[in-house]
Image (spheres, rainbow, N blue to C red):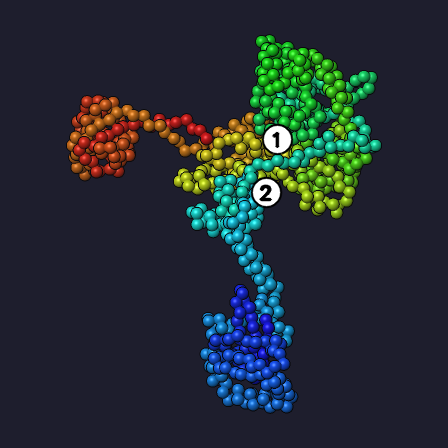
Amino acid sequence: MVNNFLYHDYKLFLSMRDMLYSYFCLSMEKSNGMLALASPKLIYNINEITNSSKEIVVDLNANIVKFNKTSVETNFSTQFDKKNKNSAKQDDNLEYRKNKSKIKKKNRNKINIQNEEVFVRSNYDRILNEDSLIRSPKSSKSKRKIKNEAIEKNQLNIDNSQETSLIKKDIFIDNPLTIKELAAKLIIPEAEIITWLFLQGISLTINQIVDMSIIISVASHYNFNIIEKRTIENLSIAQSSITVNSPTNVKRSPIITILGHVDHGKTSLLDAIRNTNLVNHEQGGITQTIRGYEVEYLYKSSIEKLIFLDTPGHEAFTSMRSFSTNITDIILLVVAADDGLKPQTIEAIEYIQQKNLFFIVIINKIDKKDINILRIKEDLAKYDIIDKNWGGDTLILEVSALKRKNIDLLLSSICMLSESKALQADPCTLAKGTILEAHLDKTRGPIANIIMQNGTLSIGDIIVAGKISGKVKVIIDHFGLKQKQALPSSLIEVWGFSSVPESGVSFQVLENEKDIKQYFNKKENIYSISNRVNQLNTRVTLDSYNNVKSVKQLNLILKTDNQGSIEAILYAFSKIPQEKVQINILSISSGLVNDTDIELALTSKSIIISFNISITSNSMHAIQKSKLIYRNFNVIYDLLDYIKDYMLNLVDPEYKKVLIGSAIVQTIFLMNKGTVAGCLVNSGKLKRGSSISVYRDTELVYDGYIDSLKRLKEDVDEVIINHECGLMCLNYNLWQKQDRIEAYELNESEKFL
């Protein structure tokens, strides 16, 4: 904005908006209105005028005014002369009062905002400089906020328009999201995404979950490239990351993980190693949680401590097995001699080969009859696992857990392999490790079973795991005794987390509480329960939205004993087909069933499922009073079978048509109750109540049922081939001669998901 010159008591202003110049005049004395410029011409700036008496042409309202520098200076000095100024002001005020209405009308006629010859900007546009007689009003906070939002929106629109000419941006999304979460990922307003989807025929709200098909469609529209898989840096603390050359490093005990298919004797083997009887205490005879045990063994005249991790063999516990391989030093791959390689055995082999782990193959149950160890070794050779006795580099041991055969050989082999690896840890550094299991205790709060991998954990340490932090209050060792510290390669129970951490998440100790926020900002939560729940819950897909049939929902509230069970159940649910019935988990957590769960189940018509937990008498009474469905399970097989059966009961019956006969319409009778088709059965038979399809030439004209069937004026149940009959359908009267009738029996098909 530049003021160019003075003309009588008017001052000319130049304003620029959207690269367009506009001119207007304001009265110096605020006595006259705004002076409109009908067709402004080029103006020469006074500052650029030389001492020569060069004339300047200024066109105001098409009236040409000629003046030179001398006249301008004289006019300027006269204008601001005190006496003349006051006199002029009095005359102007008098004139203004006499012709007030005329001046207002005249000013209204002069100002034409639509033509934008004179315009007044909003509060955000400062059209006057500090020398102006009119001050720009101050912007309130709310108006400044509106301004900033408007600027951001305009900038966003500009960016979106320019983005089409740029390379697509890569963004990682691997699970269904709500519209709100998707908008945050793409940094695009939710309303804009909802509007675009609505124009595509998909009506959604901000909190609805959309499937990957819709996410990819939206991202592609806004020039994003969805990456569904990426290489994720392992959150666990790798053993090789410990500096061997550190002067404070000491020898540490090995961590041994037992892997194998369900019922191949993993727990029995650990039972023989510990000389205990764990199998009788397992629910249903199978391991359903990851458990750690410390074993002491005499090797070369010294006591060696070995840390064993027993993992579940059921398919649903793949997450537990996966993270256990991230923290282990040695794998014991157990194969049953009477069963051979099974799916979870092959899964374990893939873990071993992908991560290049040290392992020992154990062929268990060699005491049984009809075993073929040679076949098992041949199958292992297909995966490049060759016995040392065959010239390979893999140690394959044949043991019997029940007979305790070759157990000492196994333990000495583990110690020998551990010795060759020269495992070390630094007890003087801050503690690091992994959460094995975690649960919520009603009296003690969140409790985590952890394995120490490096450093020393002490009472009062600031500990963080994933997105959860806390201060260590209690440390309980493997024997159930309270301790003040925990050293590397030890299994402990820790109290003090603010909430229940997730299983498999690494933890570490920070120096002070100020580092927590910085840690959370850097740490990415790779896996979360909410992501897995979103993958299961009711979500909108392109296929389901276009499908006329509505998918039924099974609302669930799940309560489990620990976080590991949550992951296993969610994984198992993800394997259940959900084209006909969708699992919709409204709440899932570890701990006892409480009043909040009961109220949620009552309002949402959900069923409550608990796993490996007990229920209080008060909660059970409230459930019975509310007539809710509640089931408790101790074995994951039983839980999955119940959910599948419940889903099957929600599936509508489906019938298979079986052709039983056909007939030709020969004549038509009009009756009071309707129209009767006189037919001749030319194949099979017609039955009352059977389903029929009526064809006229090759066109299907009616689908329905036979409501009445007569033979010689008598009601009959069926009419066989080469006999005449009359049939009536209450919902159809448009019979014609030569219509072809096909009769079917409806056999209910077996339900499937």
498, above or below 10, in the image:
above
Give me the residue at 78% from left, 30% from top.
244
Q: Which residue is tagged 1?
A: 319
Quarter of the rendering containing residue 345: top right
Q: Which residue is tagged 2?
A: 596
Q: CA distance from mark 2 to mark 1?
A: 29 Å
The answer to whether one can see residue 675 in this image is yes
Report the number of numbered marks.
2
Spot the residue most to the front. 52
Callout 2–callout 1 Cβ contact below 8 Å:
no
Q: Secondary structure at mark 1?
A: helix
- Residue 50: x and y in percent read 62, 79
Q: Secondary structure at mark 2?
A: helix
Spot the residue most to the top. 369
Give me the residue at 26% from left, 28% from top.
742
Quadrant in which the N terminus is drawn: bottom right
- Residue 601: x and y in percent read 54, 40
Q: Which mark is residue 396?
A: none
Q: Residues within 10 Å of mark 1 (few under 14, many from 20)?
A: some
Q: Amino acid at mark 2?
A: Thr
Give me the residue at 53% from left, 33% from top.
574
Q: Is residue 422 left or right of residue 680?
A: right
Quarter of the rendering containing residue 299: top right
Q: Amino acid at mark 1?
A: Ser
Give me the residue at 16% from left, 32% from top.
667
- Residue 507: x and y in percent read 71, 37
- Residue 589: x and y in percent read 61, 37
Nearer the observer, 478 or 413: 413
Question: Sequence order check: which comes first, mark 2 or mark 1?
Answer: 1
146, above or below 104, in the image:
above
550, above or below 293, in the image:
below
Q: Is residue 290 left or right of residue 201?
A: right
